[in-house]
Image (cartoon, rainbow, N blue to C red):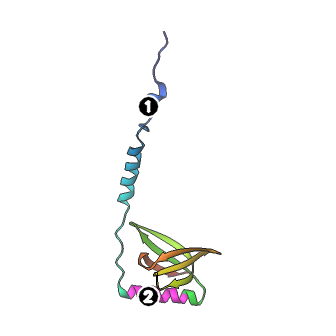
Amino acid sequence: MAIRDRGKIKWAPASFMPEGFAMTRELFKDQLRQAKPIIDDYEKEEFDLRIGYAMEFHLPVQLTTWSDGFTEIKTGKIHYIDPITYQLRVEQKPGEFERVTFESVVGVTVVE
């Protein structure tokens, strides 16, 4: 008489519940979230001066942006500042632009 068991299926993880995996991923992601840094008027003025300097001499900048609890670093040349929509147009690659809002910028560094 042959043994008829489920073999490896018996020890497989409970992958039949993808919602559980998604919830666990979100839980770990929520633990890494940070509060938005408070930027005072002097820092904003310093950011403006650095952006103006980089635009004048066509230097790349490294923008640190905050979005939904996470910071992201974007590097490129400032192409245009839109005072109506409060956005920066950053050229990351030749012909490839990305818009960054003023409110999301938490750090500016000029790369020389």
**Secondary structure type for disc 2:** helix
Q: Quadrant of residue 71?
A: bottom left
Amino acid bearing label 1? Trp
Image coordinates of residue 21 in percent, x first then y, are 41, 46
Q: Is residue 1 above or below residue 4?
A: above
- Residue at left offset 51%, top offset 85%: 51
Q: Which of these two is toward me, 91 or 1?
A: 91
Q: Quadrant of residue 26?
A: bottom left
Furthest residue toward right: 94
66 relative position to 51: left or right: left
Q: Reply yes or no: does residue 100 show up in magenta.
A: no
* Predominant SS along the magenta part: helix
Magenta-colored span: 42-53
Q: Which of these two is toward me, 92 or 50?
A: 92
Q: Quadrant of residue 44?
A: bottom left
Image coordinates of residue 31 in percent, x first then y, are 35, 58
Question: Label 2 belongs to which residue?
Answer: 46
Q: Earlier in the sequence, mark 2 or mark 1?
A: 1
Q: CA distance from mark 2 to mark 1?
A: 59 Å
Circles 2, 1 touching at the beta carbon (< 8 Å): no
Amino acid bearing label 2? Glu
Image coordinates of residue 23 in percent, x first then y, are 37, 49
Question: Label 1 belongs to which residue?
Answer: 11
Instruction: Please identify the quadrant where the C terminus is shown.
Output: bottom right
**Secondary structure type for disc 1:** helix
